Image (cartoon, helix red, strand yellow):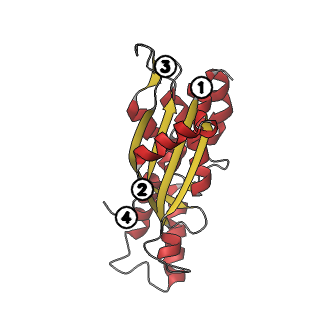
Amino acid sequence: MAAGDAAHDLKPQAAPAMPRPEREEAEQAVRTLLRWAGDDPDREGLVDTPKRVAKAFEEWFAGYDMDPVAYLERTFEEVEGYDEMVLLRDIRFESHCEHHLAPIIGRAHVAYLPTGKVVGISKLARVVEAFARRLQVQEKMTAQIANTIQQVLEPKGVAVVIEAAHQCMTTRGVHKPGVTLVTSQMLGDFRTNPMTRREFLTIIGNPSSSFDG
């Protein structure tokens, strides 16, 4: 698949299917939730909370306005034939669970095997950010990052590992703090070549148990 075809296939993911309501509607929805929680949205401490929450949502979910394909479209070919692993490790991200709107805080490790062209390393982090700043399921986010890199850059392989703590299970429900979910997606040589996969996993090391830093 050509890069242009990949961009055409992936761009529909860049925006939500439904148009956004006006800010005033969003703020009113927050006021309703505050009342439902049992508090008074008109008291001094909460009177500006709806505006703050709407502004926070703009930051938390900015990924819907980001195009991960565009970040990868500019590549560099003057790499002296470099074709070994390119790995960006410990990309910290903050996302939100689509089931409870609870925070997901973690780190992503992203690698690919170039075929004559590489992308600026910051662009890999931006791809992670674009998908993280949406309502997410970690398994889906892992696949989205890997598939986007594979389809746009067309490398010999892509590997993505995400380690994250989910507040939907640490602060509610089962209440199990200190638990980390690890997901991975291996494509191309990372899936078919055990030595390549082992090298990647060795470099990223053991999963961290804390995402507070």
Q: CA distance from mark 3 to mark 4?
A: 35 Å
Q: Position of residue 179 (x, y in %)?
A: 47, 70
Front residue of 80 and 195: 195
Q: CA distance from mark 2 to mark 3?
A: 30 Å
Front residue of 126 and 26: 126
Q: Circle 1 is placed at which residue position?
A: 154
Q: Label 1 near label 3: C-beta < 8 Å?
A: no
Q: Which mark is residue 117?
A: 3
Q: Label 2 near label 1: C-beta < 8 Å?
A: no
Q: Circle 2 is placed at which residue position?
A: 206
Q: Which mark is residue 130?
A: none
Amino acid type assigned to the residue bearing label 4 in the image:
Ser
**Where does the N terminus fall, quadrant-wise?**
top right
Label 2: how many Cα within 10 Å (few below 14, some 14–19, many 20+): few
Which of pointers 2 and 3 indicates the residue nearer the eye? Answer: 2
Asked which secondary structure carries label 3, the reply is loop
**Where does the C terminus fall, quadrant-wise?**
bottom left
Q: CA distance from mark 4 to mark 1?
A: 34 Å
Amino acid type assigned to the residue bearing label 2 in the image:
Asn
Q: Circle 4 is placed at which residue position?
A: 210
Amino acid type assigned to the residue bearing label 1 in the image:
Glu
Front residue of 90 and 134: 90
* First reached walking from the N terminus: tag 2 or tag 3: 3
